[in-house]
Amino acid sequence: MATHDKTEEKKYYTSEELQEFKELILKKIEEAKKNLDLLNAAVANAGNDVTDTSPTFKTLEEGSSVLSKEENSKLAARQQKFIKDLEAALIRIENKTYGICKVTGKLIPKERLRAVPHTTMTIEAKEMMNKRR
């Protein structure tokens, strides 16, 4: 009976596996775009209320809405980057290079890709890169 030789590791994911990741990434992009729309709406609507005439209250309210507007803008920028990273992962799926570590050339474990579908590095490679900084 032949045993699986561990030295003969997979170098890439099959088309079926890539399709599974593609579906996961498309769902994540859809969710991320919805979140981005909500954040953009929050940024656009912040500070538009002019119903209160009390100057002190108005100043305090504007101060808090500026802060939340800045926070929402930062969150929106992060969400846009996340969407771009996910879209880049889709391109790697099309190129059949998805799931291959850009540092080591080894296959990134499925568990990591399910958790962070836009990653381009194994945990080991990421730790190596962080140590160099």
Image (cartoon, grey):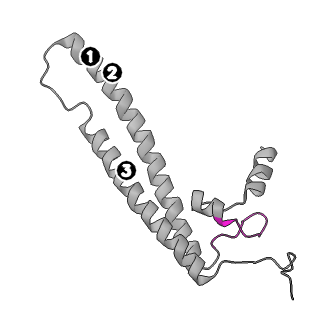
Q: Which residue lies furthest to the bottom in this view?
A: 1
- The residue under label 3 is 35
Q: Where is residue 4 in the image (x, y as percent from the top left)?
A: 83, 81
In this view, the residue in front, 8 or 50, is 8
Whichever of labels 1 and 3 marks the residue nearer the N terminus, that label is 3
Residue under the point 24% across and 30% down: 47
Read off the residue under disc 2. 63
Q: Is the magenta stretch mostly helix, strand or loop?
A: loop
State which region is magenta.
98-110
Q: Which element carries disc 2, helix, strand or loop? A: helix
Amino acid under label 1?
A: Thr
| Residue type of the residue flagged with mark 3 | Asn
- Residue 100, quarter of picture: bottom right
Three-letter code for the amino acid on which mark 2 is drawn = Gly
Label disc, if present, on residue 124 of the rendered structure: none
Describe the element under mark 1 as helix, strand or loop.
helix
Task: Tell me: 41 left or right of 79.
Answer: left
Residue 95, placed above or below residue 46: below
Residue 59's mark? 1
**Residue 116 in sight here:** no
